[in-house]
Image: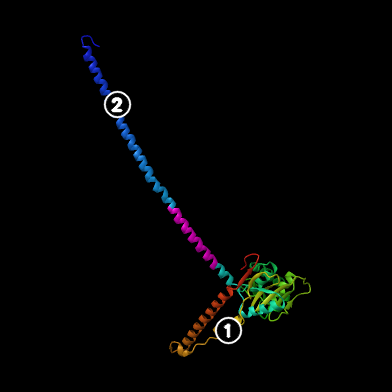
């Protein structure tokens, strides 16, 4: 201590300084504790606030899952509808079904129906050769090329249809152009196969040349339309099992009645001109025909049996 100062006084002053220092330290530590407590509470609040945020995406995902299930169901329904539409595009009329029933009993052959789009002959031959009617364009091109290369022979077949042979061949190359006996003769030569055409009997009309082989192609022809006759039980088949007696005849009558539908002029709106009445009659008749065909296609589609190695059109 400094000389001249009292020892007791000096010690008392020193003790006061120590107390002050301790008090300052205690205050600082309390502040730190408060700050740390506040940080902890803030972190807890943040973590607590983040928990519901984590749940939100789960809710959204569940909603998406529900939506995707609904979408999948809608896709299944649409695919089913598309499938039904594809099936109905290939059908046999009631009188054609009656002939198939007769053919099954006599020979065991079945008719694989072909789409009615003008390519029926070439589709039917493609079904016989390739097992797939979709290859009709290749059959058509082969036929047109062969006839074009042998004009002297095939002109005699087609001159009554078109005296201009080149124009006839040009038309034949177009998609949807019908084919007939000249084309069947050409295809028999190209494929080196006799072609049997079944119409109204179990005994077919046979088209063949001197160089034909043993691989026979079988076609069905009725109502200006060709189908493919299969002996292997493959194709889009019609289930005759459970068919009631007279059911096909009833379907025929409904279609015939629609074609022969007549409307009394008394039931039509009164017009001065006779052509207006004829127009109204034609419109009414076309509605009846369309309705009868729609009902028949639903009936036919309900009895289709598919026995094909792959989807066919």
For the question of whether residue 265 can be seen, the reply is yes
Q: Secondary structure at mark 1?
A: helix
Q: Position of residue 194 (x, y in %)?
A: 74, 73
Q: Nearer the viewer, residue 293 or 213?
A: 293
- Give the residue pinned by disc 2: 25
- Mark 2 or mark 1: name the one nearer the start of the chain: 2
- Give the residue pinned by disc 1: 253
Q: Nearer the viewer, residue 282 or 50?
A: 50
- Tell which tag, 2 or 1, sits nearer the viewer: 2
Q: Position of residue 121 (x, y in %)?
A: 66, 73
Q: What residue is shown at x 55% (from left), y 85% (from top)?
A: 257
Specify start and end residues of the magenta stretch as a single range: 59-81
Q: Which mark is residue 305?
A: none
Magenta: main secondary structure: helix
Classify the position of the N terminus by image quarter. Answer: top left
Q: Position of residue 281 (x, y in %)?
A: 49, 85
Figure check: 261 above or below 298: below
Asked whether residue 23 is drawn in magenta, I would say: no
Does residue 185 appear left or right of residue 24 in this picture? right
Asked whether residue 71 is drawn in magenta, I would say: yes
Figure check: 274 above or below 301: below
Residue with the most extreme right position:
210
Q: CA distance from mark 2 to mark 1?
A: 111 Å
- Which quadrant would residue 107 be assigned to in this image? bottom right
């Amino acid at each position: 201590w400094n000389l001249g100062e009292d020892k007791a006084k000096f010690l008392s002053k020193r003790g006061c300084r120590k107390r002050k220092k301790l008090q300052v330290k205690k205050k600082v530590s309390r502040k730190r504790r408060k700050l740390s407590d506040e940080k902890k509470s803030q972190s807890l609040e943040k973590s607590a606030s983040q928990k519901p945020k984590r749940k939100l995406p789960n809710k959204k995902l569940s909603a998406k899952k529900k939506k995707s299930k609904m979408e999948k169901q809608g896709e299944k329904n649409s695919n089913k509808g598309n499938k039904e539409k594809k099936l109905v595009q290939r059908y046999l009329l009631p009188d054609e079904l009656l002939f198939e029933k007769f053919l099954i009993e006599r020979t065991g052959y079945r008719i694989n129906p072909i789409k009615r789009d003008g390519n029926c002959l070439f589709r039917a031959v493609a079904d016989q050769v390739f097992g797939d009617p979709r290859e009709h364009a290749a059959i058509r091109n082969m036929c047109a090329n062969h006839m074009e290369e042998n004009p002297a022979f095939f002109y005699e077949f087609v001159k009554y249809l078109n005296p201009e042979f080149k124009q006839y061949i040009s038309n034949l190359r177009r998609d949807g152009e019908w084919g007939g006996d000249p084309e069947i003769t050409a295809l028999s030569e190209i494929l080196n196969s006799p072609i049997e055409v079944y119409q109204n009997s179990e005994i077919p009309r046979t088209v063949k040349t001197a160089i034909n082989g043993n691989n026979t192609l079988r076609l069905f022809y009725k109502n200006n339309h060709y189908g493919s006759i299969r002996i292997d039980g493959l194709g889009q088949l019609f289930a005759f099992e459970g068919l009631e007696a007279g059911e096909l005849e009833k379907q025929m009558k409904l279609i015939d009645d629609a074609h022969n539908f007549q409307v009394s002029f008394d039931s039509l709106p009164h017009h001065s001109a006779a052509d207006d009445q004829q127009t109204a009659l034609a419109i009414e008749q076309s509605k009846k025909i369309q309705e009868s065909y729609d009902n028949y296609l639903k009936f036919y589609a309900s009895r289709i049996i598919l026995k094909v190695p792959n989807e066919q059109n």
